[in-house]
Image: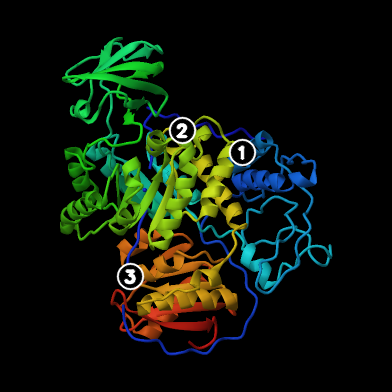
């Protein structure tokens, strides 16, 4: 067996935590088009997924699915990888499969395929192939009458091949800033790169942004950059010895005037904290690991009693249980960082700790002003981290292009037990509001140190996918972890497997819906048509990306390819669920543009001669919000 790749050796512990987006548009009524004859087709993956890690996670999920059948797992052979896989990946596959205890469960009997309800096909009894389009070795009706048909429309709607709809956001840091590592991460499936402005200087971020653009260019993919502002993170100051140990029952003072802390007190970076508190308030330090109860306030001093002790070191965060601190969402540092973000061409700005819509509106204004000289208007992501943001979530959504479910600080303020239900609610509200949503914090935390995820982490990522999140995010896992590339590979594989279990409820989604815009009506019509016609793909020619955004709010097992001449739209759509964005020249008439679009889709391997696709386009060409035509085309026939 070949040796594993040497783990990345981070220079520091530059960690991180949480970001997403949207848009809108209008024009005249489309003419009806002739519906093409139905036919078979299967979707080829547009987004890369590392097959070796797919083996690991797919086998784990299959083993869990088959547990009720009490099937004993078989060991993965050392030569399970394909011959064309690199030595590094082959070694990783063998090592990781062995660590996970990969299984090959017997097929589970499938339900009979129906015209409207997707059929449950037999569980694969071999590992995922490194070629997304290669035939697998599942049981078929010929070899096993109990297996569901793999050519039936019902099966194709639930078991598309290796196309990954859910996007991956990865944070850069010491472990992932080199060109080679970043290039491999992008090839493994990173769609959005997060620059954490809580760490590093302006020049560091500019250099990393340049590396991202070049690595993405060489990988042949468009990757968005998200600048994540630090916000008013309230922290303790520094200790003379770097840390102290708090003992339960002892007194401890948070002193806004203290310069250097000791065993009795420590300073504060937010000097107004004493005025935000009252006796009996509960303070949570270091992500809730240390708990203090406020006894009294004396001037700039907060006298507390240690309820839960532990080691407290320099610059650890402070939250008040239940929220309510008055620190503004945008600090002076954030305003300078927005200028830096615009100078490096950030596509998204993530605002930390917004309390209301006003915070997001101010951030958008500042970003648009700073971006004007560069011709940029970034998308705004609200990181939901404060308890007081929950009651006004809808207004924050209305003022943003998307939200991030930032589970770290949010859990500290509202309690861990409340977060799972809030996550589901936030994802549902974002999708209903035509906004994007990112799920973040500790999704693959163990992979900071370990080459494979825990079973709980696999379930966490899969549940976020099944909830309908646009993207899942990696923080310290890629910023400071030992296995940044393997982490991205594992997360991509989990997403692919989870998406196979998702149920399409498009007909229910459209019940009692009224559309007020022509372009939105065309987008919904394309979804409905592609689903019931079992088309190979939806191809949307779009300027702003609004058509693709509306389509991506509804889950459908048909990939959406959004073609646009705007570089900003190409990158912004990198975050939209089930959307692959492609650049196209718009200086053509409608028919020429449609022909170009089809040629691009075929040349990239997204569709082939004879496949049916659904096209949307606007006339006149080049006007944002002008999508007004839907066409059904069989590739190879006249448009």
Look at the numbered disc 2 and give the secondary structure of its residue: loop
Look at the numbered disc 1 and give the secondary structure of its residue: helix
Check disc 2 and report the residue beneath it: 481
Please, is residue 529 above or below residue 94 in the view?
below
> Which comes sooner in the sequence, label 3 or label 1?
1
Task: Say which mark, if any, is on residue 455.
Answer: 1
Check disc 3 and report the residue beneath it: 565
Q: How many C-alpha atoms fall within 10 Å of the one at disc 1: few (<14), some, or many (≥20)?
A: few
Which is more foreground, mark 3 or mark 1?
1
* Residue 410 image-quadrant placement: top left
Please, is residue 40 above or below residue 299 in the view?
below
In depth, the one of 585 and 402 nearer the eye is 402
In depth, the one of 431 and 613 nearer the eye is 431
The answer to whether residue 355 is left or right of residue 409 is: left
Q: How many C-alpha atoms fall within 10 Å of the one at disc 3: few (<14), some, or many (≥20)?
A: some
Cα–Cα span, label 3 and label 2: 37 Å
């Amino acid at each position: 067996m070949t040796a594993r790749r040497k783990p990345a050796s981070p220079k520091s512990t530059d960690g991180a935590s949480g970001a997403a987006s949207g848009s809108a548009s209008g024009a005249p009524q489309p003419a009806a088009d002739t519906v093409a004859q139905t036919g078979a087709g299967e979707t080829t993956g547009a987004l890369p997924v590392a097959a070796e890690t797919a083996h690991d996670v797919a086998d784990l999920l299959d083993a869990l699915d088959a547990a009720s059948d009490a099937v004993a797992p078989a060991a993965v052979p050392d030569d399970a990888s394909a011959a064309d896989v690199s030595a590094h990946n082959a070694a990783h596959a063998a090592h990781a499969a062995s660590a996970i205890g990969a299984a090959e469960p017997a097929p589970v009997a499938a339900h009979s395929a129906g015209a409207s309800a997707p059929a449950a096909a037999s569980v694969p009894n071999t590992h995922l192939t490194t070629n997304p389009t290669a035939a697998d070795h599942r049981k078929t009706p010929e070899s096993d009458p109990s297996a569901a048909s793999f050519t039936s429309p019902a099966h194709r709607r639930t078991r598309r091949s290796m196309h990954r709809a859910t996007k991956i956001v990865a944070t850069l840091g010491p472990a992932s800033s080199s060109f080679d590592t970043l290039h491999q991460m992008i090839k493994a499936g990173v769609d959005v790169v997060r620059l954490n402005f809580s760490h590093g200087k302006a020049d560091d971020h500019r250099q990393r942004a340049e590396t991202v653009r070049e690595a993405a260019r060489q990988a042949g993919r468009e990757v968005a950059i998200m600048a994540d502002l630090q916000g008013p993170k309230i922290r303790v100051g520094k200790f003379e010895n770097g840390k102290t140990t708090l003992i339960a029952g002892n007194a401890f003072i948070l002193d806004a005037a203290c310069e250097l802390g000791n065993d009795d007190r420590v300073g504060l970076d937010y000097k107004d904290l004493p005025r935000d508190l009252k006796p009996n308030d509960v303070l949570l330090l270091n992500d809730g690991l240390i708990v203090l109860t406020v006894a009294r306030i004396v001037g700039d001093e907060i006298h507390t009693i240690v309820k839960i002790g532990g080691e407290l070191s320099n610059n650890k965060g402070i939250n008040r249980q239940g929220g309510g601190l008055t620190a503004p969402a945008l600090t002076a540092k954030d305003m300078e960082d927005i200028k830096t973000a615009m100078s490096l061409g950030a596509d998204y700005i993530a605002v930390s700790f917004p309390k209301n819509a006003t915070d997001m509106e101010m951030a958008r204004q500042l970003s648009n002003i700073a971006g004007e000289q560069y011709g940029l208007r970034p998308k705004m992501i609200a990181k939901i981290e404060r308890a007081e943001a929950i009651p006004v979530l809808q207004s924050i959504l209305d003022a943003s292009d998307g939200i991030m479910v930032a589970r770290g600080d949010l859990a500290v303020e509202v309690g861990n037990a409340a977060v799972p239900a809030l996550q589901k609610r936030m994802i549902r509200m974002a999708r209903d509001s035509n906004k994007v949503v990112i799920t973040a914090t500790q999704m693959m935390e163990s992979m900071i140190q370990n080459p494979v995820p825990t079973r709980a982490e696999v379930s966490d990522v899969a549940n976020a996918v099944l909830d309908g999140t646009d993207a899942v995010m990696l923080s310290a896992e890629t910023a400071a972890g030992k296995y940044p590339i393997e982490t991205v590979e594992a997360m991509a594989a989990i997403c692919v497997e989870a998406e196979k279990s998702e149920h399409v409820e498009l007909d229910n989604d459209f019940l009692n819906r009224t559309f007020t815009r022509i372009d939105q009506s065309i987008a919904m019509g394309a979804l409905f048509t592609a689903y019931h016609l079992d088309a190979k793909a939806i191809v949307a020619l779009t300027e702003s990306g609004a058509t693709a955004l509306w389509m991506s709010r509804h889950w459908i097992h048909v990939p959406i390819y959004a073609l646009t001449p705007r570089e900003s739209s190409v990158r912004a759509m990198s975050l939209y669920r089930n959307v692959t964005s492609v650049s196209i020249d718009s200086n053509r008439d409608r028919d020429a543009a449609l022909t170009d679009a089809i040629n691009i889709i075929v040349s990239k391997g997204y569709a082939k001669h004879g496949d049916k696709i659904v096209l949307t386009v606007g006339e006149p060409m080049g006007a944002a919000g002008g999508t007004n035509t839907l066409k059904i085309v069989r590739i190879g026939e006249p448009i």
